[in-house]
Image (cartoon, rainbow, N blue to C red):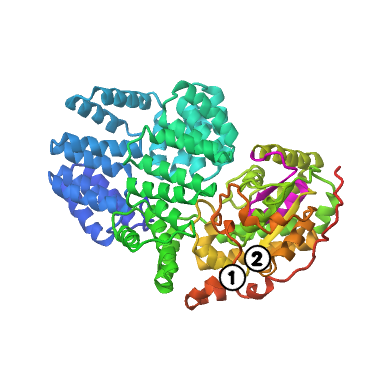
Amino acid sequence: MSVTSPPLAAGGVESEVQRIRALLKQRHFAGAVETAAALRGEYPENRDVLYLLALGLRHAHRTTDALATLQELERHHPGWSLLYQERGHCYVVLKDAPRAIEAYERAVQINPALPATWSLLEGLYKMVGNEQQRQLAVAHAKKLQSTPPEVVAATALFCDGELSAAEKQIRAFLLRHGNHVEAMRLLARIGVAREVLDDAEILLAAALEMAPDYIELRRDYACVLLERHKHAEAIEQLDRLLKLDPKNIDYRTLHATATVGLGDHEGGIRGFTAVLADTSPSSRLAADLHLSIGHSLKTLGRRTPAIEAYKQAIAARPKFGDAYWSLANLKTYTFSDAEIGQLEAAEADLSTDELDRYHLCFALGKAHEDRADYARSFRYYERGNALKRAASRYRAELVEQNTARQKRVCTPEFFRERAGYGAASREPILILGLPRAGSTLLEQILASHSEVEGTQELANVPRVVLDLQGYDPDLNNPRYPACLAAMTADEFRALGEKYLADTRVYRGGKPRFIDKMPNNFRHVGLIHLMLPNAKIIDARREPMACCFGNLKQLYARGQEFAYSVEDIARYYRTYLELMDHWDAVLPGRVLRVHYEDVVEDLEGSVRRLLEFCELPFEPACLDYHRTERSIRTASSEQVRQPIFREGLDQWRHYEPWLGPLKEALGDALSRYRERRHEPETGSRRSVPVR
């Protein structure tokens, strides 16, 4: 659900809201209530109308009615701090200190930039004799008093989800006043919320230079490093924080998360388990910790203890959608009748939040699919996708515009002029394509070879792209890929060498390693210029199977194109268009491997794959399912089993409902098999670099 009001009609509700505010300011409470109540009939979910109605009712000494209105407001806008602040005011009127404290605490939990609320909490804590909490409230109030009012106001806007207004206000402040640590921190937090992580990292690093002892700032920096998959650097920052506060549960949890990010799942499990010992067993944190332990156990191939961990997460938090989905996402777990009943009850419960609800929908889709109730299964998949898509900022046209830019910039002449650019290493093997197209299977086959290191889904190429982009990708004129034309041979070599250095932390001692990141298909040109001798493999699958596989998959992050029929079909068509372009401008550079071919002829496909990678044939690659290694993708349990043909046509169970998908895919249904330039396998020639 939104935390802000729906768009206001010009001259309609907006002008009426301003009139109600004026009436309240003039203390004409009866008139304000009458106007707001009438407006509520026309705009029953409008945040400002409901809030001002509650405010007027309280001032009109109708506190019970005010509380009922706030309850209605909470149903539509549960993440807005001022509704809880107003609820606290109502309970103060009713002389109910415990409930007033609870409401005010919820308000400052959402939005710590509420000076008046902290002052009220100080008085209430004093009244009930809670000196420790009183002192904390005093400290918060003093900090806000010492912060410029513009920064406090912008922080309040940010905490209530009004990012654009907050960013506009804080940028104006920084332009007037220059570098200010708290303002820089807030702008970085806005960057994180907008997923502009490179800018956030730069801002936080600069602010830490100015205020190295600012603990909350260092924590923010560690979190951004984690988000950017800079796990070793995040651990360095967290180690510094833990020296100051070794028992801090938050720092310990983040440290365990970073440890997992480095591929040390056993170490991560130990860290999460140690935090669990100091955590209330029925808390939200306990549920999250059990979930994290389950994910690491799943990655290590320890299915039974992973299931137990997910069930412990549900025991700690009964409507925990992510834990139910994690069981379903094992692909091998079957829900009992009782569990399906619990799932359906939780999904139908009006108090279930949207995040849990769409996780529950996807879990129910899988549960009913396993029972061959495909109609009911499809309804839940469809509902889950609709809820997830509604929460997404994905814009298909941005991907299509980027594809057009790639085609304009990356011409045959462009690559001829840059022949030999990049780092000479032959170590990387990059697997790309679309999710649910067999890339994890190819990774597992190659990782079964004695000379090849299986890693995890590495974010290093996307990170290079973000650094080159230089702007919020939502802006109309991003620098990438046009900036590639201005870069020198030395710059591309430096990018390649940095990539090799940054990925070394995920490797052991084998001479070759795999970088499997499906959406890297968008950056084949950049990869070629950075790493001209890297092997690039396109994992491709029949479009109906691939697209429906995405529509029934809920991803932990990213893959925002996967939650509507139109989006996934457009993305698949764009993928074909761009891969055709790479074939034309870099003929023979990419090996295409069709999932269906691997299923029908495993040995032939494996030999072709190894020959392309210039690796000798090893029988272990045919027994890939026996290879013990960490696998962090949705297909982790499937690739630990022998290949089976039945999976090719699973989508046909849903064919009665997939007409719109077929129509949206159009000629992609046939042309996905087309091939312009087949790579020359068996050649051991390397590209000489300048």
User: What amino acid does circle 1 point to?
Assistant: Leu
Q: Which residue carries the number 2 mark?
A: 595
Numbered badge on residue 675: none
Task: Based on the picture, tell me whether residue 572 belongs to the magenta stretch.
Answer: no
- Neighbour class for label 1 at 10 Å: few (<14), some, many (≥20)? some
Q: In this view of the protein, can residue 403 be seen by the observer?
A: yes
Q: Is residue 24 above or below residue 617?
A: above
Whether 605 is drawn above or below 226: the answer is below
Question: Is 587 displayed left or right of 540 in the figure?
Answer: right
Q: Residue at x 27, y 42 (%)?
A: 84
Name the spot of residue 493 as percent of width and height, x first: 78, 40
Return the x and y of residue 120 as percentages of the image width and height.
24, 30
Look at the picture and state if 160 lies above or below 350. above
Taking the spot 36% from the left edge, 58% from the top edge, the residue there is 9
Percent x, y of residue 368? 41, 67
C-alpha gap between disc 2 and disc 1: 9 Å
Q: Nearer the viewer, residue 171 or 372?
A: 372
| Crowding near the residue tagged with mark 2, few <14, some 14–19, many ≥20 C-alpha atoms within 10 Å | many
Q: How many marks?
A: 2
Quarter of the figure that contains the C terminus: top right
Residue 519 sits inside the magenta stretch = yes
- The answer to which image quadrant residue 81 occupies is top left
Is 265 left, or right, of 367 in this rendering?
right
Tell me what residue is drawn at x 48 percent, y 44 percent: 193
Q: Nearer the viewer, residue 6 or 304?
A: 304
Q: Which mark is residue 648?
A: 1
Q: Is residue 26 above or below residue 152?
A: below
Asked whether the beta carbons under mark 2 and mark 1 sit within 8 Å of each other, the answer is yes
Residues in magenta, as a range: 506-531
Instruction: Name the secondary structure under disc 1.
Output: helix
| Residue type at the position of mark 2 | Tyr
Query: Residue 214's x, y, as percent?
Result: 47, 24
